[in-house]
């Protein structure tokens, strides 16, 4: 038998006949007219080359072949009802699903500690995995399903096929060591241009502030160029270099090192940090739950 010739509705009819062993009652159970029920039984008999149900004094009794088919057909019908038409409700407390997040090291520092603490209470068996990749690669990762979400500044994901939620708006500040000999409570344009700088270009790409300086034709001396923001802390606290970084990262560094931050001397661009996901996951119940957790935790953060 070619499965393409099988009408799944016929299995529902078969299952109803097994349960009721009466054409009229079976038709009522699955809301078919009696003529439609009789026609479906006729098709089943042709399909399986067997009478399947024969009239007796007490109703329509299944033939040996119908009895042999009964467990398998019952399983198919129940599986369709429970797993396909009525999928199981997502249970955060029981799931052991692994969520993969595309995010730079800044977001790992700012988001993961609080997110892990929340998940430890609400979903103790859930696992997280993070990936760092160039911005242009994030779209393919989300579309293919190799990653569930992206958190951060991903301008390439503002396009059709992707959904987003804004989490925070970030600003830039200048990070210096606590006892920097030249920088006080603020840094002037002249000091900024004369200073030696440390610059981070994650994955070999320039970040938003670098594009801003280029657009304004502002040049400064870059002493060291790094691939990871987390490398900045020991460099800044042991030198007179200046690094321009997102404010939330600067606040983290202040808590863990001998550094401080001051406003940038020029009005620099803000960074809108979003949560992104592909349309394929829009209605996935586990995905919806996880997105809500992230949004509730971070959308009001300043």
Image (cartoon, helix red, strand yellow):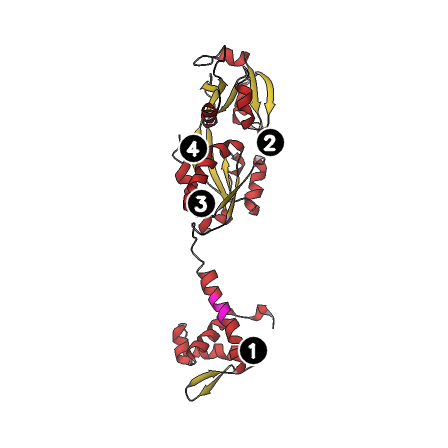
Earlier in the chain: of badge 3 and badge 1, it is 1
Q: CA distance from mark 3 to mark 2?
A: 27 Å
For label 3, the residue is 290
Q: Residues within 10 Å of mark 4 (few under 14, many from 20)?
A: some
- Numbered tag placed on residue 48 in the rendering: 1
The residue sitting at 58% across, 43% down in the picture is 140
Q: Nearer the viewer, mark 3 or mark 1?
A: 3
Mark 2 residue element: helix
Mark 3 residue element: helix
Earlier in the chain: of badge 2 and badge 1, it is 1
**Magenta span: helix, strand or loop, mainly?**
helix
User: Mark 3 touching mark 1, by CB under 8 A?
Assistant: no
Residue range highlighted in magenta: 74-78
- Numbered tag placed on residue 168 in the rendering: 4
Earlier in the chain: of badge 3 and badge 2, it is 2
Question: Is 218 rendered above or below residue 61?
Answer: above
For label 2, the residue is 203
Q: CA distance from mark 2 to mark 4?
A: 23 Å
Frontmost residue, 158 versus 208: 208
State the image coordinates of residue 128 (x, y, percent, origin top left).
51, 43
Residue 33 appears anywhere in the view: no
């Amino acid at each position: 038998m070619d499965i393409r010739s099988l009408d799944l509705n016929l299995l529902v009819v078969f299952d109803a006949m097994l349960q009721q062993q009466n054409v009229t009652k079976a038709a009522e159970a699955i809301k078919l007219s009696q003529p439609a029920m009789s026609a479906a039984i006729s098709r089943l008999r042709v399909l399986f080359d067997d009478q399947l149900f024969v009239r007796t004094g007490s109703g329509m009794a299944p033939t040996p072949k119908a009895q042999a088919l009964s467990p398998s057909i019952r399983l198919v019908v129940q599986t369709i009802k429970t797993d396909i038409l009525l999928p199981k409700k997502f249970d955060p407390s029981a799931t052991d699903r692994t969520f993969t997040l595309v995010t730079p090291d800044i977001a790992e520092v700012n988001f993961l500690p609080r997110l892990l603490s929340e998940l430890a209470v609400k979903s103790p068996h859930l696992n997280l995995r993070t990936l760092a990749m160039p911005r242009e690669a994030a779209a393919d990762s989300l579309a293919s399903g190799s990653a569930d979400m992206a958190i951060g500044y991903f301008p390439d994901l503002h396009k059709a096929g992707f959904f987003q939620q804004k989490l925070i708006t970030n600003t830039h500040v200048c990070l210096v060591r606590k006892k920097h000999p030249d920088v006080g409570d603020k840094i002037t344009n002249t000091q900024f241009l004369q200073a030696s700088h440390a610059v981070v270009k994650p994955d070999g790409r320039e970040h938003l502030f670098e594009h801003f300086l280029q657009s304004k034709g502002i040049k400064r001396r870059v002493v060291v160029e790094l691939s990871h923001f987390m490398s900045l802390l020991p460099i800044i606290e042991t030198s007179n270099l200046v690094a321009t970084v997102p404010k939330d990262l600067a606040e983290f560094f202040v808590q863990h090192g001998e550094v401080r931050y001051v406003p940038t001397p020029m009005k620099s661009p803000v960074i809108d940090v979003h949560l992104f996901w592909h349309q394929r996951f829009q209605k996935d119940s586990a995905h919806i739950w996880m997105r809500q957790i992230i949004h509730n935790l971070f959308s009001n953060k300043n």
